[in-house]
Amino acid sequence: MVAEAEENNLGDKAWNERWNRWHTCSLCEQDYHGVVRCALGWACWKTYVGRPETDWCLSLGCAMAELGNGLHLAEHYEDALTVREAELATMRRVGAPEENVLIAQSNLASTYHALERFEESNCVLRDVYSGRLKLYGKEHERTLIAANNYANSLVGIDRFEEAKSLLRETVPVTQRVLGANHDFTLRMRSSYAHALYNDPSASLDDLREAVTTLEDAERIARRVLGGAHPVIVDMERSLRVARAALRAREAKPGEA
């Protein structure tokens, strides 16, 4: 199907629809996962491995990405890392479009994280955020997503002040650009609360702000998204933790 789209110059939309068959079921429209996704990744790679590197943006690069995704989703993280590093190196060597490079870097960061190489993951996510900021500006949705990913990574390596500073800057932008009811806006507000209550040096006011932020975001999310949405589940879990931290701090006399 992909070959047909190529041979007949059917355009990017038709090519993308056909390429998606490598990772998405055409019947239920759900992504493949586990060993099936991994097997299809290998099959995709073997189909296009004979193409020259200069064909990167057409099929070879996409095939390497499919292989890396398949290995990662099957939890073969070391193998996925090898593929993702090779993918990124090749993209840079052949001069692939900057956004493609940034996507490859994001995928690499997720594999570093799965391998618990958190500092390396953080460094890559910092570069992705910086790259998208330069490419799209601070109000583009892709930049905002990269900012949130980087902030969450900072929290993961206990750099709370940097995470809070970044989120204080980007949350208002996200609310203005996407709207207060957008699910990503709600996720970013939750990220900010997470940075507040996880900081060991959080003040009583910080913990109160975290609880207030989560209560407001959870109320909006429940109204807009419904009670079963994954955003709600995550927020409820975070809210329980934040409230427990606040109660523990309030129980200590003289704490501020």
Image: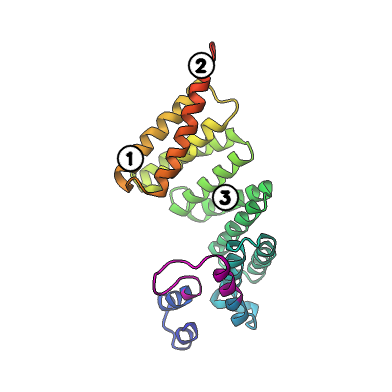
Q: Judge whether residue 41 is colored magenta.
A: yes
Q: Dot 3 surroundings within 10 Å: few (below 14), some, or many (20 or more)?
A: some
Q: Position of residue 15 (x, y in %)?
A: 45, 78
Q: Mark yes or no: residue 196 visible.
A: yes
User: At label 3, which amino acid type do we have?
Assistant: Ser
Determine contact: label 1, label 2, CB under 8 Å: no
Distance Cα–Cα, label 2 vs label 3: 42 Å
Q: Secondary structure at mark 3?
A: helix
- Coloring scheme used: rainbow
Q: Nearer the viewer, residue 13 or 137?
A: 13
205 sits left or right of 35 in the view: left
For residue 202, the mark is none
**Could you classify mark 1 by the number of other residues whose Cα lies within 10 Å: few (under 14), some (14-19), or many (20 or more)?**
some
- List the residue tagged with mark 1: 220
Q: Which mark is residue 130?
A: 3
* 3D distance between C-alphas at marks 1 and 2: 30 Å
Query: What residue is at 46 percent from the left and 30 percent from the top?
Result: 210
**Comparing labels 1 and 3, the label whose residue is closer to the camera:** 1
Q: In the rendered structure, which amino acid carries the disc numbered 1? A: Ile
Give the amino acid at mark 2. Answer: Ala
